[in-house]
């Protein structure tokens, strides 16, 4: 069975509408998608979900809790329900580019040591593109960018940790590491870092899937106390992250992607500049 897409819902109905439209456009028909609502979505967002469920080509389910459980506890509950399956967790304001999930699953198929695969993102911190560590504008053409990403040679360089805009988590690695720590962290960002570091300690890798892209309006934040809890448990984590950001080991591949993206959008740009060719004229009688 392929991976399950897990989308915890937020309160922004417009962002949810964009995310669901991108999912339909960029994900293979019949893919299992679980929309999980921790009593967050209001009436307008619920109406968006209802309309989407009636028309999507994906195999979708929607659940809603009567009372909120909390971000990490809710995610952990959903991950446990997915048993040993691989799960792609999307942020509720994400905009997946075409082919995103196929590329993440191909990354897993190439290397059994990969525990988490994270795609590029315009606002993805260590995997931000075109400038690392910045909230870059949304790409002009996700279609062209998806083609440019798919053309990159698959190297899957290691990251300090996965990032929350989108991440594919290997089911058996997640099970061996014990799932999310719902007692120590209030937010998905810190809980994902902690999970990734525990999986890394067991011999798995957290990598960039350079052939996939998932856009996002902004970066994920941390709940109060989460960074302190991470630093206490993993004292080498902050220096490792700082070293990664300072030396930017992804600079070369980021530059390659920029060049391929420019080539991919060039035909469209030329069409916009010169206009579409006029249709041939019928000969006059």
Image (spheres, rainbow, N blue to C red):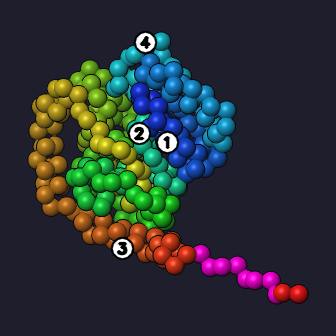
Residue that label 3 marks: 259
Sequence-first tag of 2 and 4: 4
Q: Are marks 2 and 4 in contact (CB under 8 Å)?
A: no
Q: Is residue 249 left or right of 267 when viewed as pictured?
A: left
Q: Are marks 1 and 2 in contact (CB under 8 Å)?
A: yes
Q: Secondary structure at mark 1?
A: helix
Residue 140 seen in the figure: yes
Sequence-first tag of 4 and 3: 4
Residue 279 in the magenta stretch? The answer is: yes
Find the distance from the CA under tag 4 to the CA under tag 3: 48 Å
Q: Position of residue 238 (x, y in %)?
A: 13, 43
Q: Secondary structure at mark 2?
A: loop
Which segment is the magenta one? 276-283
The residue drawn where x is 37% and y is 50% is 118
* Label drawn at residue 93: 2
Find the distance from the CA under tag 2 to the CA under tag 4: 22 Å
* Label drawn at residue 18: 1
Residue that label 4 marks: 67
Q: Position of residue 247 (x, y in %)?
A: 15, 61
Residue 177 in the magenta stretch? The answer is: no
Sequence-first tag of 3 and 1: 1
Sequence-first tag of 1 and 2: 1
151 vs 186: above or below: below
Q: Position of residue 156 (x, y in %)?
A: 36, 60
The residue drawn where x is 17% and y is 49% is 241
154 vs 100: above or below: below
Q: Residue furthest front?
A: 285
């Amino acid at each position: 069975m392929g991976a399950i897409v897990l989308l915890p819902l937020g309160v922004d109905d417009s962002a949810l509408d964009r995310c669901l439209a991108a999912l339909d456009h960029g994900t293979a028909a019949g893919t299992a998608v679980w929309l999980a609502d921790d009593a967050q979505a209001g009436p307008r967002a619920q109406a968006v979900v209802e309309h989407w469920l009636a028309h999507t080509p994906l195999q979708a389910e929607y659940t809603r809790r009567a009372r909120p459980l909390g971000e990490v506890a809710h995610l952990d509950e959903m991950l446990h329900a997915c048993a040993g399956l691989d799960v792609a967790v999307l942020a509720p304001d994400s905009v997946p580019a075409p082919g995103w999930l196929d590329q993440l699953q191909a990354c897993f198929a190439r290397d059994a040591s990969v525990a988490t695969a994270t795609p590029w993102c315009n606002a993805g911190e260590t995997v931000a593109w075109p400038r690392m560590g910045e909230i870059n504008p949304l790409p002009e053409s996700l279609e062209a960018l998806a083609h440019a990403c798919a053309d990159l040679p698959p190297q899957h360089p290691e990251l300090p940790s996965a990032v929350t805009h989108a991440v594919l988590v290997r089911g058996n690695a997640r099970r061996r590491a014990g799932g999310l720590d719902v007692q120590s962290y209030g937010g998905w960002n810190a809980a994902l870092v902690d999970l990734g570091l525990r999986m890394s300690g067991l011999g798995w890798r957290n990598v960039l899937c350079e052939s996939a892209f998932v856009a996002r309006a902004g970066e994920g934040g941390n709940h109060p106390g989460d960074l302190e809890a991470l630093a206490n448990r993993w004292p080498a984590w902050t220096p490792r992250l700082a070293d990664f950001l300072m030396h930017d080991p992804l600079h070369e591949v980021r530059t390659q992607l920029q060049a391929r993206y420019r080539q991919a959008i060039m035909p469209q740009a030329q069409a916009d500049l010169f206009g579409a060719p006029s249709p041939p004229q019928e000969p006059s009688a």
